[in-house]
Image (spheres, rainbow, N blue to C red):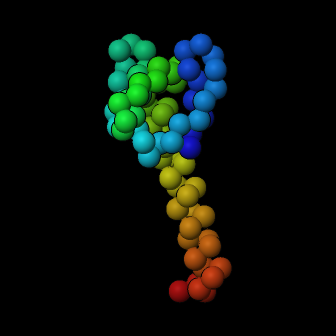
Amino acid sequence: MILLTKINNVHITVNCDMIQLIEETPDTVITLGNGDKIVVKEPMVEIIDKTVEYRRRIRQLVETEYKRQYGTE
């Protein structure tokens, strides 16, 4: 989940695995897999950066847990 800000300054979290499309028109519009659209303040590149960082954290947690359970092979 990534933290974003809607146009009306309301903070929301978005499941980045559900993002299908991001457009800058010039507002940033996120289209989710179910067709819902969300207009946010963050530019496209920032959403991409947040998504990449989120996935890195998840991968790191999985690797750490795997090593804890099964050793450091």
Q: Position of residue 38 (x, y in %)?
A: 46, 24
Q: Name which residue lies at 47% across and 42% down.
A: 16
Q: Quadrant of residue 12?
A: top right
Quadrant occupied by the N terminus: top right
Q: Name which residue lies at 61% across and 86% down.
A: 71
Question: Would residue 10 be found to the left or right of residue 37 on screen?
Answer: right
Q: Is residue 5 above or below residue 46?
A: above
Q: Quadrant of residue 57?
A: bottom right
Q: Is residue 62 above or below residue 35?
A: below
Q: Position of residue 44 (x, y in %)?
A: 42, 28
Q: Is residue 19 above or below residue 57?
A: above
Q: Is residue 8 above or below residue 21?
A: above
Question: Would residue 37 be found to the left or right of residue 54 on screen?
Answer: left
Q: Name which residue lies at 56% across and 20% down.
A: 6
Marker count (numbered): 0
In the current view of this chain or complex, which residue is farthest to the front?
34
Q: Name which residue lies at 52% across and 55% down.
A: 56
Q: Position of residue 69 (x, y in %)?
A: 63, 82
Question: Would residue 28 be found to the left or right of residue 58 on screen?
Answer: left
